[in-house]
Image (cartoon, rainbow, N blue to C red):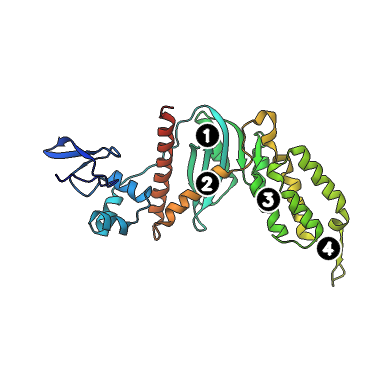
Amino acid sequence: MHKSQCPVCGSSHTVKNWKRKGTQVYRCAACGYQFRNSRMPDDPHLWRLYQENKQTVRELSGLLGVSESTIKRRLRNVSIEWEQPRLSGGGFVHLDATYWGHNWGIMLALDDATGNVLYLEFIKSETNADYEAAVRSIEERGYEIKGLVIDGRKSLFGIFSDYKIQMCQFHMKQIVRRYLTLNPKLKSVRSLKDLMDTLTTSSQICFEQKYMSWKEEWKDTLNRRSLLKSGKTQYTHRRLRSAMHSIDFYLPYLFTCQQAACEGMPNTNNKIEGAFTDLKKNLNNHSGMTEGNRKRFIRGFFLALTTSLSMKKQEPL
């Protein structure tokens, strides 16, 4: 006997479930999706195929046997709005922004323990006001911020001086690496590079002692000056000094996670960077999207992320 196939997962393990307006409705035993005896899924499930299963419009057209214009029309029917979620409890917050082009991006905040989205807002440029609005919104909705994990915008360390702040150690290494290059020639530079390679595995006391020893050992190199044709002098190793000044500025915030009051605080913002990477990978499957459709896709992506995390939380052990 012919069995109706599930339009979502393709399984033939389907059973008759009920009738709606005289039309037989089937249920897939594999994924639980309910459908009529038709190849076209409803709009929400079509959007899920488009967004989560990374199916392009052309691939969906071939899979479902309809024109691309039909797929586009059905996708336009899906309305996706984002509302800042209700919050409770508290924890450590990852806070960062990412961009598409030069004129818009998103400001995102994630809870470190659960990965839940605490705040999402579209922005035109990354300003201090955007960060302040995010923190204020999170606290007004009932969430206690125990600490912030950020990636190096210097002005934020003064604005959020009342909070425990962890500078992402990975970004710290990247900042220094841009000044030192990957294959430095000077012994002083190689020595600092080797020290920075131990940042993520060192204790605060150990790292600070080694860093101060490095500054003392190479102080003549750091203070060496060169004579210019104009008769003026300048520091000979300016990039090395720039790397040193960056470390000096961020050093008080590199090991906040090791304080007794910040137990469980991460030392990097890998969680939020991973969310940005997954989002951009999904978006790259759908080139040529308008800005409006791209924003709708982003809202849908984080709504799906929030839903999946909630379902995992409710699953029995």
CB of mark 2 within 8 Å of CB of mark 3?
A: no
Is 28 situated left or right of 290 in this image? left
Q: Is residue 185 left or right of residue 42?
A: right
Q: Which residue is mark 2?
A: 274
Whether residue 130 is visible to the viewer of this picture, yes or no, is no
Q: Alpha carbon of mark 2 to alpha carbon of mark 1: how far?
A: 21 Å
| Mark 1 → mark 4, Cα distance in angstroms | 47 Å
Q: What residue type is disc 4 on?
A: Gln
The reply to whether dot 4 and dot 2 touch (C-beta < 8 Å) is no
At label 3, counting other C-alpha atoms closer than 10 Å, the crowd grade (few under 14, some 14-19, many 20 or more) is: some
Image quadrant in which you'd find residue 210: top right
- Image quarter where the C terminus lies is top left
The amino acid at mark 3 is Lys
Residue 166 percent coordinates (x, y): 65, 39
- Give 9 or 226, whichever is nearer the viewer: 9
Query: As rendered, which of 145 and 167 lies closer to the eye?
Result: 167
Q: Residue at x 54, y 33 (%)?
A: 113
Comes first in the chain, label 2 or label 3: 3
Q: Which residue is mark 4?
A: 234
| Res. 138 mark | 1
Disc 2, SS? helix
Q: Secondary structure at mark 4?
A: strand
